[in-house]
Amino acid sequence: MVESVFMAELTWPEFAAKVAEGVTVFLPLGTTEQHGPHMAMNVDVVLPTAVCERVARNVGGIVAPTIPYGYKSQPRSGGGEAFPGTTSLDANTFSLVVRDVIRSLGTDGVRRLVVVNGHFENCWPAVEGVDLGLRELRRDGIRDMQVMRLEYWDFVGRDTLDRLFPEGFPGTELEHASLLETSLMLLLRPDLVDMDKVPSDGPAQFPTYDRHPVPEGFVPASGVLARAQGSSAEKGRLLMDDHVERITRAVRAEFGV
Amino acid sequence: MVESVFMAELTWPEFAAKVAEGVTVFLPLGTTEQHGPHMAMNVDVVLPTAVCERVARNVGGIVAPTIPYGYKSQPRSGGGEAFPGTTSLDANTFSLVVRDVIRSLGTDGVRRLVVVNGHFENCWPAVEGVDLGLRELRRDGIRDMQVMRLEYWDFVGRDTLDRLFPEGFPGTELEHASLLETSLMLLLRPDLVDMDKVPSDGPAQFPTYDRHPVPEGFVPASGVLARAQGSSAEKGRLLMDDHVERITRAVRAEFGV
Amino acid sequence: MVESVFMAELTWPEFAAKVAEGVTVFLPLGTTEQHGPHMAMNVDVVLPTAVCERVARNVGGIVAPTIPYGYKSQPRSGGGEAFPGTTSLDANTFSLVVRDVIRSLGTDGVRRLVVVNGHFENCWPAVEGVDLGLRELRRDGIRDMQVMRLEYWDFVGRDTLDRLFPEGFPGTELEHASLLETSLMLLLRPDLVDMDKVPSDGPAQFPTYDRHPVPEGFVPASGVLARAQGSSAEKGRLLMDDHVERITRAVRAEFGV
Amino acid sequence: MVESVFMAELTWPEFAAKVAEGVTVFLPLGTTEQHGPHMAMNVDVVLPTAVCERVARNVGGIVAPTIPYGYKSQPRSGGGEAFPGTTSLDANTFSLVVRDVIRSLGTDGVRRLVVVNGHFENCWPAVEGVDLGLRELRRDGIRDMQVMRLEYWDFVGRDTLDRLFPEGFPGTELEHASLLETSLMLLLRPDLVDMDKVPSDGPAQFPTYDRHPVPEGFVPASGVLARAQGSSAEKGRLLMDDHVERITRAVRAEFGV
Amino acid sequence: MVESVFMAELTWPEFAAKVAEGVTVFLPLGTTEQHGPHMAMNVDVVLPTAVCERVARNVGGIVAPTIPYGYKSQPRSGGGEAFPGTTSLDANTFSLVVRDVIRSLGTDGVRRLVVVNGHFENCWPAVEGVDLGLRELRRDGIRDMQVMRLEYWDFVGRDTLDRLFPEGFPGTELEHASLLETSLMLLLRPDLVDMDKVPSDGPAQFPTYDRHPVPEGFVPASGVLARAQGSSAEKGRLLMDDHVERITRAVRAEFGV
Amino acid sequence: MVESVFMAELTWPEFAAKVAEGVTVFLPLGTTEQHGPHMAMNVDVVLPTAVCERVARNVGGIVAPTIPYGYKSQPRSGGGEAFPGTTSLDANTFSLVVRDVIRSLGTDGVRRLVVVNGHFENCWPAVEGVDLGLRELRRDGIRDMQVMRLEYWDFVGRDTLDRLFPEGFPGTELEHASLLETSLMLLLRPDLVDMDKVPSDGPAQFPTYDRHPVPEGFVPASGVLARAQGSSAEKGRLLMDDHVERITRAVRAEFGV
């Protein structure tokens, strides 16, 4: 059989052997969400999975199946639920999924877990899911599971951003379906990007508040919040290398692997 | 961009266009579960996804992302939660995931959904999830969503079973990591099967009741409930063709597509 | 006072004394559901209660109150929720009831419990309820409660079925309000059966999938899924004797009582 | 078949016919709880069921199955959960049961429901269950279901109490397993009462507050909160007649039946 | 900084120091609810907070922030949800709030807690919240937290009531926005009472049952259930003194403080 | 009676009259959380309440009671749950509170609501609570409630920040118990600040990830994440004026008030 970094491609005895050795497990959190007219809706699944795959290789870890449905998209960070195709869970549902997966892994003996989020809105329900999962394990007598939880995009150097945005980094908050994600997708899945369809109705001009229900025109019609022009696989490579190296370093520092 | 049958590989305008045409959406339900020492743990993800992919092509449908964590494995049907690597959700969690995905798709305008289960234990929490999802849509004023829900293995002919089991079909209940699943995996992902590791400790001899907690020796140590010897890609092809043809026919009959 | 096998007919000191002796408690799971035009709606309460009563006498056990509202009836196994009088709980509600009753009994010191299901659809939410109940007890420091969980109709011999169905057993799946249940009711509560009203619109011809919402004509109008003609108290006696003897034997084997 | 006032003893067409005529349904709420060393634990099931049966006969109504597991017993009103045999549900579980039963009955067309509580602690979770049930029905478009909710013991005249307690009525709050309940059980199920075992450790002297966890000696060791001496079937008859007459009158006044 | 009896006015080191000394914490439960045309809607917040403040001073305790949204008002005890301004939580929500606050305080080391309810309808969901909170703490290994739970109005002497109601006390059940609450508010917040607006449409004449939905005219239009005429700050002083003295005595007796 | 901007200080007819006029309601979200050794734990209650009070005066609105227990503090934004006194709710609990309050207000006729968050961690569970509340109202037929949701600290001008931080603004993420909050408290509640106790162990040096459980030394021992030196009431005035003016402007723009 294939030697695989993906947990789901192992047999159970192979998995059991790795757990016995203290393997670090990576859990990617994605969603199915609009990413503009120029990209497929699996961006938030593809990217954290790819990051996890590379970091796991670096540290001898394995990658659990990516959660493909995440927390509800918000207008100011992902365009919102009104876009067709954005398919999401309630916060409590998402937290329970994370809780149950952590409880299940912990019961199997996993003691080092890195939760790698690839969809901004997942962040807080994931925090809650981790807390609930560890609470349950604790009550089952398992008190030594260690969890790191991170957004992969936070692992990037100032110099990388300067190279990618010579005119200044607009900030991650509008980075939905924009230059960073588009470049990473051009690197990983160019078949799922069509640069001819990159829209020019951004960047979004959001107020500093939410509105419910979301008014007409609150979000750019394309769903692209900043600008995707100028994206390239080369830029994606720069970014990916930075993400992987920095997350690898952090995991090694924390878990001693 | 690629022409894809997978919803997550579409852009949102492509998805919106298909929904406007009344597309049939397939939702595969899988899990991450031990499947013996000779197969990877993604069997229940790979198989329903492959079935959905083929049927969707036949009827012009699309396939939503497969749910990769399912309901808790039971000793008599999947070996149970004690096997390392089996990673599962509570029933309520799983039902809420199905509910939320259905609500989300229905709100986007999907009106024909086929829920294709690939993990036995998912069956009942999926029934509940469908009921809860339609209840929510109904209360939001959407009353015309149509759902079919099925286990793919129920779509097989007597003649196919007779060819696969010349000495008699042992019944689906013990068909976990056994001849049918192994043959299908040999067809689809031979890299994830190692026939040299097929165990011979089955078939399981279960009583007609559950025991909680599960006693020692209740389940074959290998996790294979029946027998996987004699599995082949050719048999997998026979089965897959039967599944796809019969499900295609049923979907066409019900949805007129 | 009466010497009773029913827990609810004991005083609390009598119950406490039995628990101190390690009594086996039986918990029947029923529902209130249509059973054709010829039988009352309490079939799934009467039958498992009667089975439990007899087995409990055999092994010196006691019978907890039967849960009278079960999980939602499904078209292919019980006719579905559209029949007036079928009165059901959501899956989560039913699981929580089972969980709480098990927690309560376990906290009182009960260590041997047999959950006897009399309504097909209860099966899976009961599995979940047992798991949740034992999880709670475990977290309260109670780790030695033993549970058997069963459907009473699975305890029947080939020979009995051959005598009841000389032309071949149609399978339990359509056995709703049909020969087996009707015969048992004729044995136990003939006052609640009117053989003159046995319908002849069955057996049901179900496809291998569910449909939601349930289409017109999916289920026989009578609610009887197979055939009830030929039912008799004598056949009921044969069946009941087989159920009781086989369950008694299993409980003795497992619990050493 | 028997002509029955119990819904569960009707066939579904009989039930449907009654619903079509606007039948009033009675839902008794009970529990399984210690009632002293002299009475069985089904007092809170037997009494509201008997009241409902009699009132239903008076007004042409029917009685749904009694809920046999209620909300957790409290020390000051029922002795508390520490008594063996007291078997209870969490408040949310109990409310969900009531919610689901009401939703199910309302969906079937029932429009007049009388919820008759026989266990003090059920009162508030029942209030919530009724509210949640009507909320769900309202969202399903059913806005005309009418519910009365009552504790049967509140339907008693001053004169009756004066006859039962010539030295003054001690108040309902301590009436657990005491004169009123014991007399009613002597009327209805004398086989489940043993007057020789009536204890004399009451009446309880409770402070005006709860203590959690419950301290030693907070509750009389017998579980009887007031006094049961002097109970008689004759007194039970007086009480029962008063309850039935007054509840009948109230139902007639409210529902015009 | 101010020396304060209110926990929220302490710094965390001050709080930690008090906890280390075994401080008794008081948790007032209020709500936001109509209290007639003559009083503000914060009566059930002001009163239990004031009681706690005074008792805490007496015993060297501190007062946690008052919960300002309580369980749904009922017609027979608070006028019901139909009154504008009455702003309430579902029972489960309220119980979870109480559970979480208790878990949080217990985790911080608090071992003596007095839950002081100021809104009748909170009583039972508070009981449940206390039970759930202690259950969670127990499962986290904290078994020695002691809780008292009380309604402040139950701490009043016969002689006080005789002085306040020379013509006889009508009972607490109708004491909503009536003489007792009005007098206490005149004592504490006379700026929030307008005696000129005291209505005269009471006292309410309630039947001994609930009605859902609430019929027209079931509740006095003013929301005042008994009579508020004759309220005075002086009477409020009498009452408050009695409440504070009696609760202080009870807390001292139970907790030895 | 007092003319008040606080909803809880109105009578119900006064509230009803304001609702009839289309009043804008402000709902402040706070928590009880450590804010360093120099400030009380009610900072996140005092500040959003004060902001709401001032904006409400500007636009003729009213302020609903502040929610005093919020979502769990996180190490990187509030120091985390390990600090004594930080008293928090699970995410689901907090979302349900927000949901229920919104449902209750909406049912009463409120159509313009501004949710003003004063505790960073509340942000996402509040988003969910708003979504759930509007979902419930929608299902009850109320579709025209408008909600704005905001963090008050996002309403500040570049020039104000430049004046407050002449050496550069460190970013809001570390602004816990630091210069901004301390200055605002010096303005509003100087009695609850002790500048002599301002610690100097900050600013915190956090990695770009969470760790669960939180390791020793992850958070500054004082709980102050940045620096509070240099705080003053004058700076608080500058900030408060900016917050109030900008939020007032936004509310006017959105709601036309």
Image (cartoon, coloured by chain):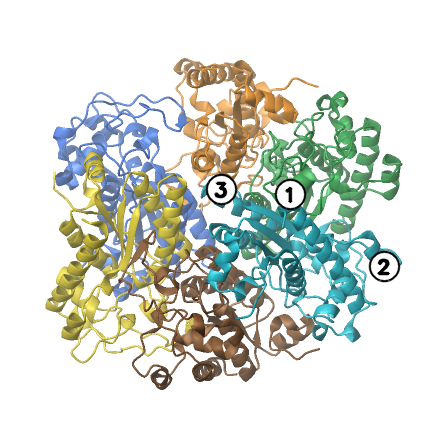
Chain colours: A yellow, B blue, C orange, D green, E cyan, F brown
Is residue C48 at all visible to an observer of this figure? yes
Numbered disc 1: secondary structure:
helix
Relative to the observer, which residue lies in front, D143 or B143?
Answer: D143
Where is mark 2, residue-wise? E163
Q: Marks 3 and 2: in contact by CB < 8 Å?
A: no
Q: Residue at x 40, y 27 (%)?
A: B210
In the picture provided, is F112 more to the left or to the right than A32?
A: right
Relative to the observer, which residue lies in front, D160 or B146?
Answer: D160
Crowding at dot 2, Cα within 10 Å, few <14 / some 14-19 / many 20+, comes out as some
Can you tell which quarter of the image residue A84 is in? bottom left
Residue F73 coordinates in the image, percent (x, y): 41, 60
Where is mark 1, residue-wise? D122
Q: Chain of mark 3?
A: E
Numbered disc 3: secondary structure:
helix
Name the amino acid type tagged 2. Arg
Q: Marks 2 and 1: in contact by CB < 8 Å?
A: no
Residue at the outermost front position: F196
Residue D127 coordinates in the image, percent (x, y): 64, 49
Q: Residue at x 74, y 63 (%)?
A: E181
In the picture provided, is A106 more to the left or to the right than E130?
A: left
Residue A256 coordinates in the image, percent (x, y): 20, 49
Residue C95 coordinates in the image, percent (x, y): 48, 39
Crowding at dot 1, Cα within 10 Å, few <14 / some 14-19 / many 20+, comes out as many
Q: Marks 3 and 1: in contact by CB < 8 Å?
A: no
In the picture provided, is C225 more to the left or to the right than B229?
A: right
Q: CA distance from mark 2 to mark 3?
A: 45 Å
Name the amino acid type tagged 1. Asn
Q: Which badge, 2 or 3, is on the more N-terminal residue?
A: 3
Marks 1 and 3 share the same chain? no
**In this view, C162 is above or below A238:** above
Where is mark 3, residue-wise? E138
